[in-house]
Image (cartoon, grey):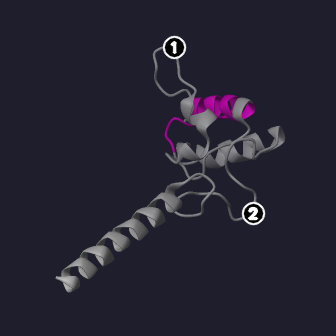
Amino acid sequence: MAMAKLLVLLAIALVAIMMAESSMATAPGSAGGEYHLDRAGSGYGPGSLKSYQCQGQCNRRCSKTQYRKPCLFFCNKCCAKCLCVPPGFYGNKGVCPCYNNWKTKEGGPKCP
């Protein structure tokens, strides 16, 4: 009986530890599973860019799309407002909530 209680207690502790690690890995500001630094060492996230850096970051972001002109137009517009561009060529918008949450009149995403 004591051995069964000990096993249940250990299982509960293990689950609690796994849940804590999971929440820390996805929490904003943590390094787990999210981009925060690029190769040059500048951060991602709200306000992480200066306005003069938008063109270079949008060139990177839009470099692999077949719709380059509209991508660059909207990316630069979003970057000017939010002062951040998510890492990668697509997705990762959660790193920059302003960029992610700016919507068109129809409710679609404004920022590429």
Q: Position of residue 99 (x, y in %)?
A: 61, 35
Q: Magenta span has 74?
A: yes
Q: Magenta span has 63?
A: no
**Mark sitting on residue 41:** 2
Of 52 and 82, which appears nearest the observer?
82
Q: Quadrant of the N terminus?
A: bottom left
85 sits left or right of 80 in the view: left
> Is 47 rendered above or below residue 101?
below
Q: Looking at this rendering, what residue extends furthest in the bottom direction?
A: 3
Q: Quadrant of the C terminus?
A: top right
* Amino acid on which the number 2 mark rests in the picture: Gly
Of 56 and 16, which appears nearest the observer?
16
* 2 and 1 marks in contact (CB < 8 Å): no
* Amino acid on which the number 1 mark rests in the picture: Lys
Q: Which residue is mark 1?
A: 105
Q: Looking at this rendering, what residue extends furthest in the top direction?
A: 105
Under circle 1, the secondary element is: loop
Magenta-tinted stretch: 65-80
Of 86 and 29, which appears nearest the observer?
29
> Is 64 rendered above or below residue 24?
above
